Image: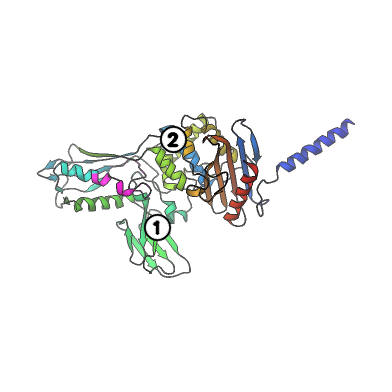
Amino acid sequence: MIRKISFILVFLGSLVNTVAQVSPLKLKGDDAASIGVVIRNLVTGQDIVNYNGKMLLCPASTMKLVTSAAALSTKGEDFTYTTSTYLSGKVIDGRAMGNLVIVPGGDPTLYSEYFEPENCTFFSDIIAKLKQLGVKEIAGNIIVADTNMPDQGPVSTWELEDIFYSYGAGYFALNYADNVFKLYTQTGTTTPFIPDAQIEIENIGESRNIIHGLNSNKYVVTGPKVFEPDSRVTMPMNNPSSALMAALATEIERNDIVFVDGFTPIITDSIPLTSYNSKPLSEILHSLMVRSDNMMAESALRLLAPDMPRDSALVREADFLNSIGVSTEYTNILDGSGLSRANSISPDFLADVLQKMTLSPVSNTFISLFPRAGMDGTMKTFLPNTNFTKRLVMKTGSMSGVRCYAGYLLNNNGRPTHVVVIMVNKYFGSSSNVKRSIEQFILSTLK
């Protein structure tokens, strides 16, 4: 009798394990896809769903919530980037006998499309100060001060094809206009102006293609209809410093201050000009989370180690996560944005980060960074006009073969009741079908 009972218990245990491995998502080919789901009740701390919670998966842009958590907790919501300028020589009889020097501070928002560029006063502050000093001529150049920040530009683990397009814009010590420019293919002109750009446009092929080498000023655009009026493409800048300096020089001369040749800049004690501060970090993080901005996410990561290699920032991010009780032992994190396809983390890891951040002194601000279902950014078309509109706040992550969501379910007071993490890799069919399956799962599982 004892042997029979033991056999039955073993059989039932096997049956339970088998049932537990049935995917909670109804996807075409879900037995072939890699799927991980964690829904955690924050009151009890227990998972009401945990399917492949420990499986390592590509997170895509859900990586941004981890980066934002580390940056916000380390620097605080009121932190601002500072970009300063000075003259390297004296002003004699209205002539500045030296260079106008820009000291970069890593601000990713200078003349950003997403922060009202018309209200940015970086250029106008400089011009106002020059006029206050009586400057009418500058016997020097605009230069950018040396910075100790290594590893500028696109992340080395990003795919080459990604850096051809605007979402692959790199992060630099000095950034300008989101580090992207519009190329009008009919005329070959750019906005903003890109000095030394070598542009080739060919009306060949059946689809639009962009070729732009790493650290190269050569841009090639091919495809049909490239010579039609208003045809344009948006591409990343190779050197945003040169574009900013060109734009600043134009504005200075437009205000009747001219650059004069034939003089050797006299480097003496510097004359401070301006100190320009960005918007608060909380506003920058909200913008990058809602829009899923890769360049700004990389700027948030580099805040953890501004003058050190990118790897040092990743180490400090891991130190932060371990300090709040989130293990990074089984993770592979290579950037701040999630654009690297080699990133691999688990649903449990994301759930742990989200849970621990509800206990953080900056929890309210952190939760406010997420786009809201049916309302904002990448979540605007997710579960609109349902009970989850505004109440489900999640960071999305999408790339070829990857669809991920991670965030919170909120109560009517705006406080989180559940952590929700859904990661799908290597799926078949369209991404819209995956999205619909995830929506149906949430509708049937949460209230």
Residue, x 68% and y 46% (percent of image)? 23
Compared across the picture, whether 117 is left or right of 77 comes to left
Distance (Cα) linking label 2 and label 1: 30 Å
Magenta highlight on residue 104:
yes
Compared across the picture, whether 81 is left or right of 138 comes to right
Place of residue 220 in the rendered image (x, y in percent of width and height, measured from the top left): 39, 63
Q: Is residue 360 visible from the viewing direction of this image?
A: yes
Magenta highlight on residue 212:
no
Which mark sits nearer the N-terminus, 2 or 1?
A: 2
Prevailing secondary structure class for the magenta stretch in the rendered image? loop
Secondary structure beneath dot 1 equals strand
Residue, x 19% and y 52% (percent of image)? 253
- Placement of 272 over or under 206, stated as above or below: above
Compared across the picture, whether 409 is left or right of 150 comes to right
- Image quadrant assignment for residue 16: top right
Secondary structure beneath dot 2 equals helix
Amino acid at pointer 1:
Thr
Q: Residues within 10 Å of mark 1 (few under 14, many from 20)?
A: some
Place of residue 309 in the rendered image (x, y in percent of width and height, measured from the top left): 41, 40
Return the mark for residue 234.
1
What segment is highlighted magenta in the picture? 103-124
Q: Which residue is mark 2?
A: 72
Q: Are marks 2 and 1 in contact (CB under 8 Å)?
A: no
